[in-house]
Amino acid sequence: MNTRRFSITLPATPASAFAWHAQPGALPRLLPPWDATRVRSRHGDLRDGQVVLEVRQGPVRISWDARHEPDAFIEGEQFVDHQQSGPFAHWRHVHRMTSGPDPGTSTLLDHVTYQLPADPWSRLGTRVVDATLRRMFAYRHWVTHADLARHRETPPMRIAVTGASGLVGGALLPFLSGGGHQIVRLVRGTPTTPDEHRWSPESGIVEVDRLGPIDAVIHLAGENVAGRRWTPSFKARIRDSRVGPTRALARSLAAATHTPAVLISASAIGLYGDRGDETLTEASAAGTGFLASVGQEWEAAASPASDAGIRVVHARFGIILDARGGALAKMRLPFSLGLGGPLGTGRQYYSWVSMEDVLGALLYATTRDDLRGPINVTSPQPVTNAEFTRTLGRVLKRPAVIPVPALALTALFGEMAQAELLGSKRVLPAALERAGFEFRLPHLEDALRHTLGRREVAPDA
């Protein structure tokens, strides 16, 4: 039997740390983004619940049925789960929270015992599992610490979210849940759970008054601009998926009996256009080109809400780094194979941001009255494409020297290549920094190691 212990001091009392783990969003938050594990089903709570995970072992996906142990449960202090069926011969995980070294802190101890199925490769398998555990608990403990620190600054709210099934929305809901916020999901299809309400942005039907009192609305809907080559019809979809729904939502909020305090509406740094090495802040003028034009219309579409006295924030997202999707997910395979390299000259600036800081910035903007209008949601340290390429290669321990000519990119992707891959935007988050927002992952290498699982923590002795 193998035994491993991992511990961390958390910025919360044992009761608060336990309460965070008891929230429905805690498990999705703790699943590493790099290995594609997902929750297939879950029932009950930390006392006697059941969770079925779908995990990947190479090309094969298998089911992992985990059960909580009622006899080992201690309210506010400890919960235990074990494998009922799955990849191990034995697996048991004790999660224990005790008083920390300082007032208002706690120590989280994760005590894992496991045994692999008997086979001639079990010794090698143990080394692989141990390396996986070191990476997994480095991620889990970082997220737990960061989330508890973020949420202690914000009181629980009732927040409506559109685009909840997208890359940002899928990460945002578990994050908000961990803070005790009540989430109302605005969905286009038929609602299937009590927290879902239907909206039809194409027809302008958003029955806001049926939602009850809402403190904040986070609007994330919009077609992926890098999903394919930009044909005239696809460009129309990009525009129409942003401008019309935003206008419909803003008008509905403005006409509601109980208006929310804030509408945070997604936008993008594409609004600045291709600007070379010019330093860009929220005070910079919009640029030229298709995305710049769409961005201006997109933000203007929210004006009915601001005219009604609702604080409106336009979250201008940079390149969001998350192993589960977006630009980084597309880069991961070629770079892992040693086939990555700079795009074009590599001198164009990439204004990136970690998913963790996207989530933190959205939460921060819900309560900061001094944040209104555009805010750049980007790292304070933009890099050139060449530097991005070198850093990603270093994190993955692969060469990244095969350049991709600009002509080839333009031939493959047309107008989209110039706007998204070859264009330069050196954007700084001046408004967020002025408001005192703390970036958790401002350095590119740290952000990549976090989401790609390239950090390890040593087990306790």
Image: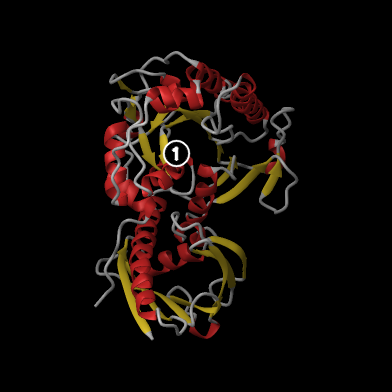
Q: Residues within 10 Å of mark 1 (few under 14, many from 20)?
A: some
| Residue 443 visible in rendering | no
| Residue 340 visible in rendering | yes
What type is the residue that disc 1 sits on? Answer: Ala
Q: Nearer the viewer, residue 61 or 80?
A: 61
Q: Residue 112, image x and y in percent?
A: 39, 77
In the image, residue 45 above or below residue 74: above
Q: Residue 49, image x and y in percent?
A: 59, 74
Display colour scheme = secondary structure
Q: Nearer the viewer, residue 253 or 453?
A: 453
Is 390 left or right of 114, judged from the image as shown?
left
The picture quadrant where one finds residue 428 is top left
Is 73 left or right of 248, judged from the image as shown?
left
Q: Quadrant of the C terminus?
A: bottom left
Q: Residue 53, image x and y in percent?
A: 56, 66
Q: Quadrant of the N terminus?
A: bottom left
Q: How many numbered tags mark residues here?
A: 1
Assign a secondary structure to mark 1: helix
Q: Nearer the viewer, residue 288 or 393?
A: 393
Q: Residue 322, image x and y in percent?
A: 43, 46
In the image, residue 90 above or below residue 158: below
Is 332 left or right of 162, judged from the image as shown?
left
* Pointer 1 residue: 327
The picture quadrant where one finds residue 187 is top right
